[in-house]
Amino acid sequence: MKYRWDKKYLYWGITAICVIIISFLVFAAIFEFKGVLGVIGFIFRILSPVLYGFAIAYLLTPLVNKLDRIQMKTYFKNAKKPHKAQKAARAISVVVSILLLLGILIGLCMMLIPQLITNILGFYQNIESYFYNLEDWINGLVGQNSSFAEYANQILSQAKHMIVGWMSADLVPQLQNILVNVTSTLWSVFSVFADLIIGMIISIYFLYSKEKFASQGKKVTYALFSHHNGDVIVKNARYAHRVFGGFITGKIIDSAIVGGLCFIGMTIFRFPYPPLISVIIGVANVIPF
């Protein structure tokens, strides 16, 4: 007699496993909360390169798709083997996208890190005048004979000695060494973010085979759920991807425009630190309010 697979047994098995896992997690969370946090942190550290790779691949997907369409309409328009041409176009698109991302990150680091260090050193050199101006402003606001002014000036004096002492002893010597050895500093920064570099490598695999992963995800969805529920899940996933992906793409383009306009305006009016402030404004503009 031929055995007929019934999905209800699969549902029962998955439900039982989920109940056991949830019961174990609830018990562990109640009696071993610190241990649970440690395990979660350990799992996240292990999976962080994969998560970084997925995030990078998702952000670069619109660019890869655009490059694919351009190449298929131009260089591979009359290809005799469209399947191989599509693979070649995808490989070129992925490599170009990753190199563009690396170029942007390295360029921003090389532009911002030296200027940020220079600005901090300039702030350290002028910190005395900043505090004197602040004291004069407080005295002019509340009056020199006011007890509040005396109290405020005392606090400012203590804060000035504390900040100057910390910057003189710890911050400034380290920044001067970093400023002299910018190349080695950048290399150290990228060495620290090894997970991010591994994530970029993983993102190449995700980008090259994204249609395959999407197809496998659909198969798993229809294997676990009924045809109707599977259609609902796939439809909602596509809608979420279209809305969220469009939002992220629009935000990045909008932030690039805002940062560029800020840089042009600050350069025209000769405001100080145009690259640093423009990048900060552009990055802050990505954050939804």
Image: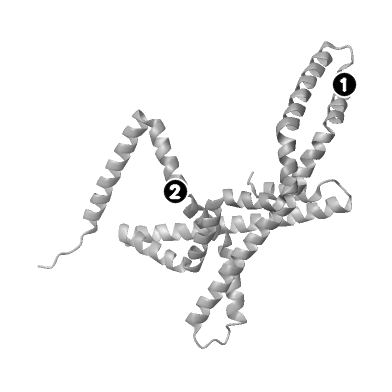
- Which mark is in front, 2 or 1? 2
- CA distance separating discs 2 and 1: 56 Å
| Numbered badge on residue 141 | 1
Residue type at numbered disc 1? Leu
Any mark on residue 9, and which? none
Is there any visible trace of residue 85 in the rendered image? yes
Residue labelled with disc 2: 46
Provide residue 44's location: percent of width, then percent of height: 45, 45
Q: Amino acid at mark 2?
A: Ile
Label 2 secondary element: helix
Q: Position of residue 189 (x, y in %)?
A: 62, 49
Q: Identify which residue is drawn at 83% across, 35% down.
A: 125
* Near-viewer residue (280 or 44): 44
Q: Is residue 43 above or below residue 171?
A: below
> Relative to residue 190, is residue 83 depicted above or below?
below
**Residue found at the far left of this picture:** 1
> Viewed as shown, does residue 115 lie left or right of 227?
right
In this picture, residue 7 sits left or right of residue 80: left
In the image, 240 versus 30, the foreground residue is: 30
Q: How many marks?
A: 2
Q: Which circle's residue, 2 or 1, is located before the other in the chain?
A: 2
Q: Which image quadrant: the N terminus?
A: bottom left
Residue 2 or residue 95, whichever sits in front:
95
Callout 1 environment at 10 Å: few (<14), some (14 to 19), or many (20+)? few
